Image (cartoon, coloured by chain):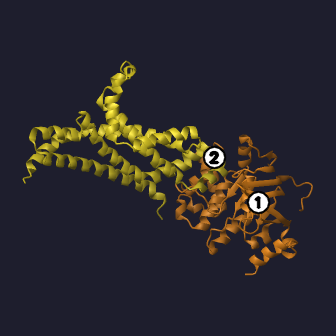
Amino acid sequence: MVISEKNEAIIVLEGVTKFYGGFQALKGCSMVVSRGQKIVLCGPSGSGKSTLIRCINRLEEHDSGRIVVAGTELTRNMANVAAVQSEIGMVFQQFNLFPHLTVVENLMLAPRLVRKLPRPQAREIAMHYLARVRIPEQADKFPIQLSGGQQQRVAIARALCMKPQIMLFDEPTSALDPEMIKEVLDVMTDLARDGMTMVVVTHEMGFARSVADLVVFMDAGEIVEQAPPSEFFGAARSARTKLFLQQILTH
Amino acid sequence: MSFDLMLVAASLPKIATGVVLTLKLLVVSLLFGTALGIGAALMRISGSRLLAWPSFAYSYVFRGTPMLVQLFIIYYGLSQFEGLRNSMLWPILREPFWCAVIALSLNEGAYAAEILRAAIRGVDQGLHEAGHALGLSPRQRFMHVTAPIAVRLALPAYGNEMIGLLKGTALVSMIAMNDITGVARTIVAKTFAPYEIFISAAIVYLSITWVIQHGIRVAERHFNRYIKK
């Protein structure tokens, strides 16, 4: 792991475990993300990637270990949880746009309710980020009237409206038709260039290669290997990583 | 067999005088019943056994017994309690109208609770998570995400329930109230023409049902605007 001294650690995971009943989804995961870093989490399905990032913004509660985000440790203390959640934006595989609100209303909801912004100001921010994801003209449509790629870009903009320090992506392109994957990855690449701290669960190895600072490989609830993409794709060390790479890169 | 169309025509306006009471019962019971139903549904989904259990028992009892029996219990039964007869509530509770409203509301609430509970459960869990990730409080998530979507999901079943309640109001004629059915029965007692008179009553009920169905359809169209491509 390459973290220079001046780079502040913004996410620290230490020995994080998570059980679902008797099934252990995370078996002591440790990882440090410094500000501005782009992490790609990959691994076979069921390896715990989604669980791990869902623990980072407390959609799932971890059972032991420590999670510190932007200097605040995630505990049962609800104030801490709220503080951490307001620093983190999340994008889901299924977009999860609010179907009963128009695109611009989707973006305005959290700034209005959580940040207590007046409508005109919330709308201004919303339009700014809609322009950034290149669909300002869709502002007054309902989500269902948009293509999957457009919906996912709206979801990214919705998260950005809260001005988070960190963005989490949980398989953002897995539910998309192939022709729409690029438009979403392009928006994510733009975001990466602007210096956003990103943790991305994805099978898009091209994206990992070109954008990630660090590729983290998980299998069976463990972090097996973490390395910069050149090293990861060129000279993976563990047998499990090699097998995984063979499986996804052969076609 | 003879059918006297003139008698139908003549009795329709008289029967229509019962409409006011029927509609009053319907609207008041619907308001109270919906409020009860929302409360009971929230208790059911609260995750607290202490709250969920009474709500479950309430729905179970009122859905599992005939409304006529409930009406009789309330109308004839409440006066058995001396404490109640001496209480400030007695002027209200001795009125057949309020007894009817209590029975109809409790009944409506029990069904509404089930409909609303199912609708709330039917809202995509992912939307809940999205709200969570955006930092919305549980209350904000419920008010701004879950509730508006649940209303849309509940609407068709709720429309049926309203029509069921309309028909249920006919039972109040059993406690000597002059709703549509009550008026019809009075006329039958004078004319000995049950066929024509009750058909007239049925026509009046049907027209109210038509209005309700139409209203629900308009509401559905409004709420469904965002699920049509």
* A80 on left or right of A124: right
Q: Residue furthest bottom?
A: A251
The quarter of the image holding the N terminus of chain A is bottom right
Residue at which label 2 appears? B136
Residue B154 place in picture, x, y as percent? 45, 51
* Residue A118 can be seen, yes or no: no
Question: Label 2 amino acid?
Answer: Leu
In the rendered image, the vertical position of residue A193 relative to residue A73, given as above or below: below
Q: Tell me which chain appears orange.
A: A
Establish whether labels 2 and 1 are both on one chain: no
In the rendered image, the vertical position of residue B30 relative to residue A6, given as above or below: above
Residue at which label 1 appears? A198
* Residue B151 can be seen, yes or no: yes
Q: Chain of mark 1?
A: A
Disc 2 from disc 1: Cα separation: 22 Å
Q: In what element is the residue under mark 1? A: strand
Q: How many residues crowd mark 1 within 10 Å: few (<14), some (14–19), many (20+)? A: many
